[in-house]
Image (tube, rainbow, N blue to C red):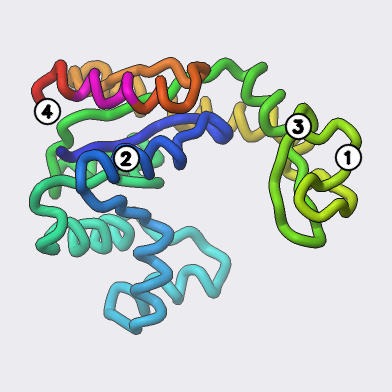
Amino acid sequence: MKLIFLGPPGAGKGTQAERVIERLGVPQISTGELLRRAMKEGTETGVKARGYIESGALVPDEIVLDLVAERLAQPDCQNGYLLDGFPRTLNQAEALERVAQMDAVVNIQVPDEVIVKRLSGRRVCAACGHTTHVDLAPDGVCPKCGKPLTQRKDDDASAVANRLVVYAKQTQPLIEYYEKKGLLLSVDGCQEMNAVTEEILARLQELGR
């Protein structure tokens, strides 16, 4: 089972990815993790990537694709995998086709207004690191240690709205691309967490993938 997960920030994509790979018994491949590991190990691709990162430039698609191709060739990926954070653009999606053929692309859909409420209501305890929501801690006090809760700058409502605009602009071409290929599975991310997981797995089973 070779999968790609799409979904806006706050849609629960990370949580669902963890649940699905556990049920399917396949690895989750994170391009960010691949880059960090390659640089730490000093591989040829890692050295190239470090040069771009240290100069403040984006790592070219060709280098990221090389890392992904190297990882997908490893034994634990032979029965499938879930790509996390790649592809992010249409160019990357087209390049990916040269090294792998996906079975399905899961798109977790959540309306913008729900995302804004979820993320702008998120609060973090600076003392113990616990993350919660204002609905669960309306008094602004950490339920774990009793210290004050704070809001991260990128969780401000206007910041969240801006992130959603960027995501939509970047991802809509991907959604259309995979929809035309018959690979897109859109799932309602507003459901209860377990229901989302079961719908994803059921949709994949229906396709015989």
Residue position for label 1? 140
Residue position for label 4? 209
Residue position for label 2? 91
Residue lying at 73% horizontally and 43% vertically, measured from the top left: 154
Bounds of the magenta segment: 198-204
Q: Position of residue 189 (x, y in %)?
A: 47, 21
**Residues under labels 3 and 1: Cα distance?**
9 Å
The quadrant the C terminus occupies is top left
Q: Position of residue 148 (x, y in %)?
A: 89, 50
**Mark 1 or 4: the one toward you:** 1
Q: Dividing the picture into quarters, in which one does residue 33 lie?
A: bottom left
Q: Position of residue 70 (x, y in %)?
A: 19, 64
Earlier along the polypeptide chain: callout 4 or callout 3? 3
Amino acid type indicated by mark 4: Arg
Residue position for label 3? 136
Q: Please indicate, yes or no, whether residue 173 appears anywhere in the rendered image.
A: no
Name the magenta segment's main secondary structure. Answer: helix
Asked whether residue 14 is drawn in magenta, I would say no
Amino acid type indicated by mark 2: Asn
**Residues under labels 3 and 2: Cα distance?**
42 Å
Q: Is 135 or 204 nearer to us in this picture?
A: 135
